[in-house]
Image: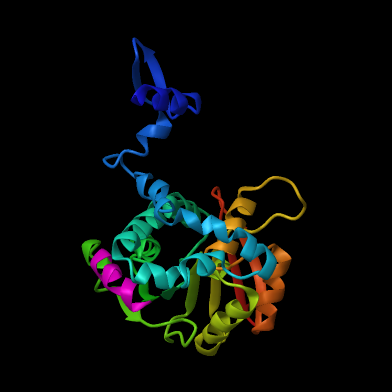
Amino acid sequence: MAEPLLRFLASHEIFEEKGNHQFDHTQLSQCLRSDAEGSFRPAARVLHPIFPFWDGLHHSAITGESGFNQIFGRPFFEYLGTHPDLARIFDAAMSASHVHQTAAMLEAYDFSGVHFLADVGGGTGSLVSAVLQRYPKLRGLLFELGNVAGRARESLKACGLDGRCSVIEGNFFESIPGGADTYLFRHVIHDWNDEQSVQILNNCRKVIPQNGRLLIIEAVMPTGNGPSVTKHIDMLMMILPGGIERTEEEYRLLLKQVGFQLSSITPTTSLISVIEAKSI
């Protein structure tokens, strides 16, 4: 009974039929193997256990609030904190889906002027690890929730970077640790609405030095109504955490509210750009 499924998947180039009812991998299916280098399997799996969140679309569209909260009764990241098996898949999914973005960011943006980088909401540390490995004189700090920080410490230790990068537990809605000259947020600000984002960035503004820099690593929403992958992600952000993807002008206005001036946007060969801002 597997053959109808294989035929269906072959019609979408996920497998290919070789004849005599035999099917083989394509590039698409190969990268979904658990033993494939840079396997995309976790990213393909992560939404399946919580697929009913789409039932919250109507609630999100009407109220602007997270549909996930409405369906599951708690915020998305809080839910991950109480479901460790899903949290591990989520960590692996983020690493798998962001690895090419990290490489593209490092090729496009020069970190040589940074001495102490704080990765705020940096997950298990894949990004800060990559930056530290590229720039051996750089020191780092990763700031995360307690239920993630332990996994981040293990990851940094496995990379041999625990001596150059500390892990601090906390909640960026309450405070952000000082001491760094550059504060980086990758795929953090798009998780939250404007009011929540202002709260996070205000906490960053309190500790960033006057000559420091703020880096927001996000996709920049194109203007107009043409098709864009960013608009698909925008739907996920709206329903899951209750966030939003933003245009360049929307980032400019958001940053201005908290005393930052958008100084540059560096595009990369991936979906994301490096949005740099400095204190006004």
User: Relative to 223, is 249 above or below?
Assistant: below
Image point (35%, 71%), residue name:
81
Main SS of the magenta part reads helix
Answer with left or right where residue 57 lies relative to residue 145: right
Where residue 4 sits, quadrant-wise, is top left
The answer to whether residue 148 is magenta is yes
Q: How many marks?
A: 0
Residue 239 pos. (x, y %): 57, 62
Colouring convention used in this rendered image of the protein: rainbow
Image point (34%, 26%), residue name:
2
Observer-nearest residue: 210 or 166? Answer: 166
Observer-nearest residue: 139 or 253? Answer: 253
Observer-nearest residue: 130 or 113? Answer: 130
For the record, the magenta segment spans 145-155
Residue 62 pos. (x, y %): 69, 66
Residue 233 pos. (x, y %): 58, 55
